[in-house]
Amino acid sequence: MIELNQVTKQYGQATVLKNITLSIDEPGIYCLLGRNGAGKTTLLKSIAGYQNITNGTIKVDSKAITISTLDTGVSYIENFAKHFNLPVRKLIRIASEVNPNYDYDFALDMMDRFELDGKKKFNHLSLGMKTMVSTIICLASNKDVILLDEPVLGFDAIMRVEFYDMLTQSFQKHPRIIIVSTHIIEEIAKTIQKLIIIDKGSIRFFDTLQSVETKAFSISGLQKDVKAVTQNLNLIGQDTVGGLMTSYIFDYPPEQTAALEIHPLSLQDFFIQMVGHKGGAIK
């Protein structure tokens, strides 16, 4: 379980996390979305205990998290993570030797699956393969909380599909909280259970993917018609061209009529409406 209570993080005069209160209490694969600079990496590093926060508290399984916490119960891999320049197989073996709960067989299976050359030294790998080694080591740790920051950087399309399969397989074998930060929105939609959207240091949305599928819609038509049916609905965005209007809602949609076009929003379009304009507001 992850508990954030009024968490604020400042770097000098810049406030990167703003009074975040959030509880994640169920195992699942969570997707963390946000624009560049929204605070995604800062949030993950703070939960992992890689840096202290300015105000508030963070707890994992009721244990307070700071940089002095000896065992946070969290495994975190950031993008462009570095390792000792050792052969891949040796890196994986060392990781297993320092962690009694390490799933060494899973790590070896994934190494074979992604055709990683166990004899090749880490610095000689491509960016994608370096990221894959880091991700395998992180998932095999069997920690109760797994944090993956942009884990598909440098992956081609086939590697990304294999990665999502690996993520699902790892979760099914050891259910826990896995949070994945990514920019490739639609691809991960088939894998995740819940979505977290952070914008300008604040949590804008936290709910199931199913809620997006059932309540995120666009409604288009003449301005007077669209305004009439959306006046009591939760608007998250709006576009107007001439006398035509498209409203974006997070609410149960009105009945379809000949005067209106009502379409479900993709996850990407929902994200854009939440953060791409002035930012939506879920009531």
Image (spheres, rainbow, N blue to C red):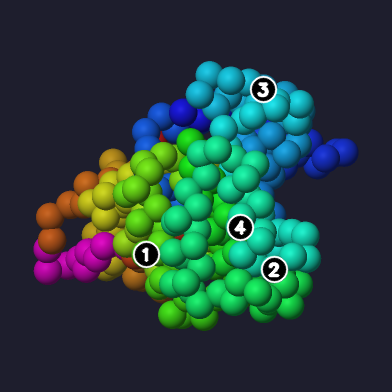
User: Type of residue at label 1?
Assistant: Asp
- Residue at 68 percent across and 76 percent down: it is 120
Assess whether mark 3 and mark 4 are in contact (beta carbons under 8 angstroms). Answer: no
Assess whether mark 1 and mark 2 are in contact (beta carbons under 8 angstroms). Answer: no
**Along the polypeptide, which appears first: circle 2 or circle 1?**
2
Q: Which residue is mark 4?
A: 92
What secondary structure is marked by label 3? strand
Q: Which residue is mark 3?
A: 56
Residue 84 included in the magenta stretch of the image:
no
Q: Nearer the viewer, mark 3 or mark 2?
A: 2
Asked whether, in this view, residue 13 is left or right of residue 218, the answer is: right
Mark drawn on residue 87: 2
Assess whether mark 3 and mark 1 are in contact (beta carbons under 8 angstroms). Answer: no
**Residue 199 horizontal/vertical position (percent):** 58, 48
Residue 263 included in the magenta stretch of the image:
yes
Q: Badge 1 local density, few (<14 within 10 Å), some, or many (20+)?
A: few
What secondary structure is marked by label 1? helix
Rendered position, 58 above or below 150:
above
Q: Nearer the viewer, mark 2 or mark 1?
A: 2
Assess whether mark 4 and mark 2 are in contact (beta carbons under 8 angstroms). Answer: no
Q: Is residue 247 visible?
A: no
**Along the polypeptide, which appears first: circle 1 or circle 3?**
3
Q: CA distance from mark 4 to mark 1?
A: 20 Å
Q: Nearer the viewer, mark 4 or mark 3?
A: 4
Mark drawn on residue 165: 1
- Residue at 43 percent across and 47 percent down: it is 30
User: Type of residue at label 4?
Assistant: Ile
**Residue 173 horizontal/vertical position (percent):** 34, 48
What secondary structure is marked by label 2? loop
Rendered position, 3 above or below 266:
above
Q: CA distance from mark 3 to mark 2?
A: 41 Å
